[in-house]
Each structure stands twice: as C-alpha cells, then as structure tokens.
Image (cartoon, rainbow, N blue to C red):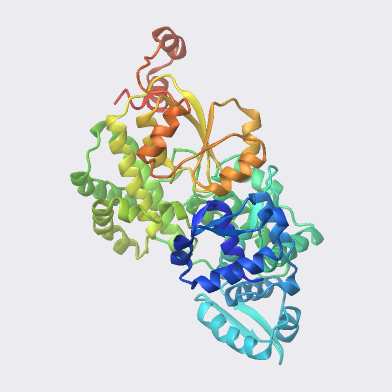
Amino acid sequence: MNHFNLDLIKFIQENSPVSLDIVLSKYQKTLSTIKRAIKEINDYLEPENKIHVINAKIITPITYRDYIKFVKSISLKRYISTPDERIRLFILQATLFEAVNRKEFYSRLNLSYSTLKNDIILLKEKTPRHIEFMLKNRNSWAISGDEISIRINFCKNIFNILELDQNNNLVPHKANSPIDNLISEQFLNILRQNNLSTEAIYQTINSKIELSYNSKKYLIIYLSISLYRIAQHHVIQHIKEISIKHINYANILQFDNTENQFINILLSALNHKTERQSIIDPQLYKLVTEFHKEIAQFICINQSDEAILIPEIYRVIYSSILQSEFTIDFDDKKLDKVDHLYGELYHNVVHFIKTINDHYQATLTKNTISTIVLILKKFEIRMHSFNQKRKKVYIVTNSSDRKVGYFKALLLATFDIEIMDCININEIYILNKNKFDFIITFTNKISNYLKEEGIDCIKINFELSPEDIAMLIKKGFPNFKSKINKDDFIIQTRGMNETELHHYLTEKHGNIFI
C-alpha cells in the first residue's frame, strides 16, 4: 500500500459515485494504473465495502469512518512511504533527538542504501534556509541552525497530522498514514514522558486573545516543541528585526525575554477570532488605506462600510506580513479557484498591493490575495443585501472563519438567516451546547462524518451555485419577505447608548443600516 492508494480511496469515498474520466484527469494516471490501485485497495476492504467500476463510474459505499478504519489497518511494514514522507519523518526526528542514526532509520522502514542516498539529495533541496544537517559521527546526523527556523519548520511539517480535542489537547489526526501516525505518536509520547503541558500557558494567552481553531492548534504545537527544545538547552538566541509593531504581553513563558518576545510576534501573526485589531502599525495602516482608495475604483461598496472594510483588510495583510517573515503558512484549498472566479479583481489586487509587498519586502501568498478579494466581494454583496429575523445556521468547515466571510455574505444576501458561528470539524461538540436550525458544510468528507455522528447537515458548493440556492429553498431556508418586528427591536435596543446601538446595528442588522 502506498500514499497514492490512500489518496485515491479518500477521493473516491468523498465523491462516490465519481466519473472515471475525472479520476484519470485528477491523477494523470493510466486506466490500468487506476484499476490496479483499486484492486490493491479492495484487498483490504470488507466484501460489502469494495470499490466497483460500473458504466465508467467508480462507486463505493464506504463512509469516512470506514476510511479511517481502512487506514489504521495498514501496518508500517506493509506501507511504501514516499520520499516526502521520509524527509518529513527525518526532519522531525532530528528536531526531537540529538542525532538520528541513518542506518537504523532506513532499516526500520525496510529501505535500501540507494534509497537513503537519493533521499539525502532531496533533504538538502528541501531544507529551509538557516537550517542544516551535519554529520555528528559516521552514521548519525544532527540538525543545527537558527532555533526559530527549526521550530517553525517542525510546526509546518507536523501541523496537518495533529488535531485538538475539546480540552485543547493535541491528538493524532484520525486518518493519518502509517508514517504520519508514527510521527504524531512519537511526538505526543515525548510530551507525556517529559510531563510537558501547555495548558497553563495557553489559558494565560486565551484570557487575552481568542484565536481561530487552526491558529490555536499552531500555537499549541509551537509551545509544545518550544518547552521540549528549551528543556534540551536549545533556546532562541536572536530574533531578526521586523519593521512592524507587534503584540507585547510580558512573561507568557517563564523563561528569558527572547523566548517571550517571539511568542508575542507569533501571536500577532496568527488569526484572531475577535474583530478588533489589538495592535495598529501606523505606516501599514496608511498603506492599506491607500490600497483601498486604489482598489475602490473597481468595486461597488458603500462609503459607510469603509470603517469596517479597511480594518478587516488591514488585519489580513498585517498577519500575512508577519507570517511571511517567519514562513508561517496555513493552506486553504477552498481558495484555489478565486483567481479564476474573480479574475479581473484578483489581478487588480495583485497590482495595487505591490506597494505594500515592496515596502515590507514580503511575499503575500496566493491565499492572502484570494482572502482580500473575497472580503471585497463580501462588502459588495452587503450593499445589496437586506437582513431580517433569521433562522440559526452553523457552518462546519476546516477553512478559517475569516476566509469563509465571503460565503457567509452570499448566504446573508440570499436568505433570511443568522449565522451562529463557523466551526472546525474538531469543534462539533459546540453544537451540543447551542440551538440551531441548519448546519452547512462544503465537502463530502465533513458531510459524511457529521452524518455518521448522527448530525443532519446540508452540503453545498463554496461558490453557492443556483442549484445550491434552489436546494436550500426546498429545504426551508427563508427568503426576504419577512419584516423586523418593531416591538422586538425596541426591547432589544432599549437602554443602549450611542456606541452600543451603533455596534448592535452593525452586527445584527448590518445589511439594513449603512
């Protein structure tokens, strides 16, 4: 069994029934290769769950839970690892241990000496700047270099194979490959053996800043590896100067100021759930305001919305500059079509944001540009939308709330609903604590998982197609024929001062009052 087999069964499980042509196009493989992979997969599946090719379609009844069971049934000895997986394992072990014996490493994976030599070439190509691998003795390699880069590289490589439980403890991702399962379990065992807990530190931080799920997970991984590396006497010696102001909470870690300083920078770079920006850099804010003036020529937005729009774009760019400085990146697959969907606006954002890129010598990612485009489109939609008494809706997605803002605006412009929150699949315990009318998700994977947990949901496309709208209307999503009850409005706003009333009207009825 190999990584391609796992990816193929996952894709089929999420999209079944799926056209054979779509599979051939996606993987750029021959028909015989696909059929051979299906045969290998079927050898592991129960008779009732086997994959079939019928009338040029690939069909399987397996659920996401069955897929997890399938992955867990594959032992490390029966799994053919990819070079990327081996490189990731090697980097992570080198970060956790003083040295890695190359012969023992490849012997455990049942690999040859020639594979070792090829992987070493790839390792050198993939090793980030400021990190190097050195021969400690004839057979052992050790990692060295800038401590911040070593920790950030660790977080990047382990991020997708760990999740958080409802108590914010790190746990393995349920559908890890055998190699990824080895990595995650090894790391978590080390944390347990060394009694390294981030609970107290995270609670201190959470009392000041509320982070999105992915940012919270990233922070807890960083804190965990930091505690371990510090205990092994690998401390941050130096932090490069950055030309932007950042959060400054003292003594988050009970160590020296350098460690605390970088945690403050990291907190500034992560995505916050709260709308209020905790730190404003005057120069950047000025540049963002100038960017807004330029891009406003190409999009129709209410002038009264500028007071909300500019800070929202500022928050995205501010975080992205800091993430670029330290190569922190959260990929979001939901944004990979934005440049095609809104090509002209995307091109204009790229053009006008170049001034900010050049000023900070930063590289704002495609995800960042796409996020800004969707924010602009969200406010354009707001101009035409009208919001009354609403049904309560939750969105369950692995994308951040900020990036789903565009989709939320589409929904609010089309239906008379209240979006309660946007939660991660690992936060579905929140649903047990609150009343709601509908749950929406974008992928078959999450939809199937929720249904397996006994939770009804509606799966639609991120772009909200006409077919999606028709389906939602059929399922009972209300339109805009209803009115706001004036008695309810008077009761809800009674006693509010001017600031409180302004905030209430913006948050609850932002599509009516401009």
**Quadrant in which the C terminus appears:** top left
- Front position in the image: 52 or 62: 52
- Front position in the image: 103 or 505: 103
Is residue 276 positioned above or below 366 on the image?
Answer: above
Q: Quadrant location of residue 429?
A: top right
Which residue sits at x=37%, y=64%?
363
Q: Position of residue 368 (x, y in %)?
A: 39, 55
Q: Position of residue 497 (x, y in %)?
A: 41, 17
Is residue 157 positioned above or below 334 on the image?
Answer: below
Residue at the farthest bottom position:
138
- Front position in the image: 55 or 408: 55
Q: Quadrant location of residue 277?
A: top left
Residue 294: tell me if it is visible.
yes
Residue at the farthest left position:
297
Q: Quadrant location of residue 300?
A: top left
Which residue sits at x=63%, y=71%?
2
Residue at the farthest right position:
193
Q: Position of residue 434 (x, y in %)?
A: 61, 27
Which residue sits at x=46%, y=55%?
333
Q: Position of residue 15 (x, y in %)?
A: 52, 52
Residue at the farthest top position:
487
Residue 259: tell me if it is visible.
no
Q: Is residue 305 left or right of residue 227?
A: left
